[in-house]
Amino acid sequence: MFRGLLRLFGVLLLTGLFVSTATWADSGAQVYTGTLGKSPIVLEINTRTGEGRYFYKKYRKDLALDGAMDGETLVLEEGSRMENSRPTLRLQPALDGWSGEWTSTAGKTLKIELKPAIIPEVPAGSLPYLAKLHDHATYEYLRLQGVTLKKGKTETFMGYTLQWWSEPQTKTSLFEVVSGYSPEERQRINQQLMARLWGQVLSSYGCGGYYAQSSQPLWMSSAVMSVRISTEYFCGGAYPDQNQEALNIDTKSGKLLTLEDVLWVGQGQPVRHEERDDYIDTSSGSSDVWSKYRTTELAPWLVAQLTRLYPKDMTITPEGSDDCGYNDEGPWDFPGWYFTPQGIKLDPSFPHVAAVCGFVDWSVLPYNVVKQHPGGVALQLP
C-alpha cells in the first residue's frame, strides 16, 4: 500500500485542484510563479528584508536573492554577495504580481512575469509530511512538483526486509520497511522514513553547491530502530562540512525518539524537546529548560559514566590528533546517539575545526546502565 502511495504522489501532485494561494503574511515572505524569459520559475521574496530565492522548475536548485525597494522598483541581485558582479532582477508591481527584467553580468536582458503562486491541493493518501509542507513551506512544496522516487534494491537486515528508494537527480536515498512489523506499524515507520528522504531531497536542491547524502540501517528490533543519515556538503561559507545523524524510531508508535525519551538523569519528569526539522517547525518543549538540563545534569553525568567505563579513551588523545578533551563536559551536552546491540552509542559534538574528534567507536552506554535511568517513553530494550 505504501509503495502505491509513493507512486500516486508522483503522478497526482501535478493534477490536484488548485485552490490556495501562497502568502506568508506573518513573515512578509511571498511565493510567486511565472517565467524568466521562456523558463518557468518559482520565486520567494520577503519584501521587508529584501531577501529571497528562486529556482528554475527544470532544475529545482536555489539561486539566492538580496536587495531592496528603489522607489516602486524591487531591485534584487542574484547569487553570493562575495561576487564582484551579479545578475540583477528589477521588478515593478503589476496588477496581479510583478513584472520586470533580469539582466546578466554581460548585459543580456530577459523579461520576468510573476503572479502569486496557486498551490495544488495535497492528493488523498499522501504522506503527512507533504501535507505539512503544503501548509507551512509553500516554496518547498512547489519544488517537489513532479519529483518521483526510483525503486532500488531489496535487502534483509536483522530479519527485516527493506526496500530502497532514491531520487535520481539528487541521488538521495533511504529505505522503507516491507516486512517484519505489522501493517499498521510499517505504515507509521515508513511515514517517518519517507518524510526524512523527501527532506533530504529538499536539502540537496536547496544547497547552491555540493551536497551528497547516504544512509544505512544501524539497528532494528521489535521495539526500536536506528538509521544513520550521512551528508557531505558545501553550500557556501568558508569550509565544506559533513554530518552524521541518527533517526531513532519507536516502532510501536512510529514516533521519533529523543534522548530524553530513552535516558533521563534529571529531577522530575523528563523534558522533551524537538528541534526544527526538514523545513517543518516541529519544535516542542521548553528550549531553555532542556538546554539547562543538558549542560548542568546530563553532560556531567555522561562524563562520569564514560570515564568509569572507558578511562583510557576518555583521557588519552590518539597520536597525531589534536587534544579532543573527551573528559570535558562540552562535547557531551548535545551528543548524537543511536541504538546498538550493546547499548546506546553516543557521538560527542565538536565545532567544525575539531570535527574529526566526533568520530569515535567506543562511547557506548550499556543497556544495564540506561535501564536504571529510564526516559519518558516505556521501551523494551535489549
Image (cartoon, rainbow, N blue to C red):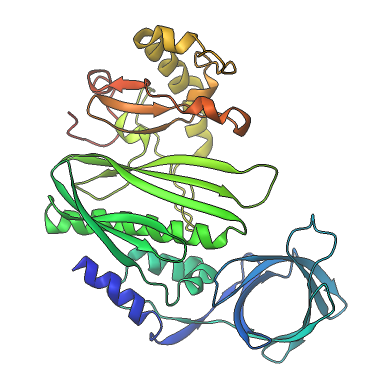
Quadrant into which the C terminus falls: top left
Q: Is 337 placed left or right of 371 in the picture?
A: right
Residue 92 is at least partly visible in this image: no
Quadrant into which the N terminus falls: bottom left
Residue 174 vertical placement versus 297 (above, below): below
Residue 28, by quadrant, is bottom right
Q: Position of residue 151 (x, y in %)?
A: 28, 65
Q: Is 272 in front, or is 213?
A: 213
Q: Position of residue 224 (x, y in %)?
A: 23, 40
Q: Is 258 in front, or is 160?
A: 160
Residue 291 vertical placement versus 33 (above, below): above
Query: Which residue sits at x=38%, y=55%?
Result: 196
Residue 97, by quadrant, is bottom right
Residue 179 is at least partly visible in this image: yes
Q: Is 81 placed left or right of 208 in the picture?
A: right
Q: Position of residue 369 (x, y in %)?
A: 27, 18
Q: Position of residue 114 (x, y in %)?
A: 66, 85
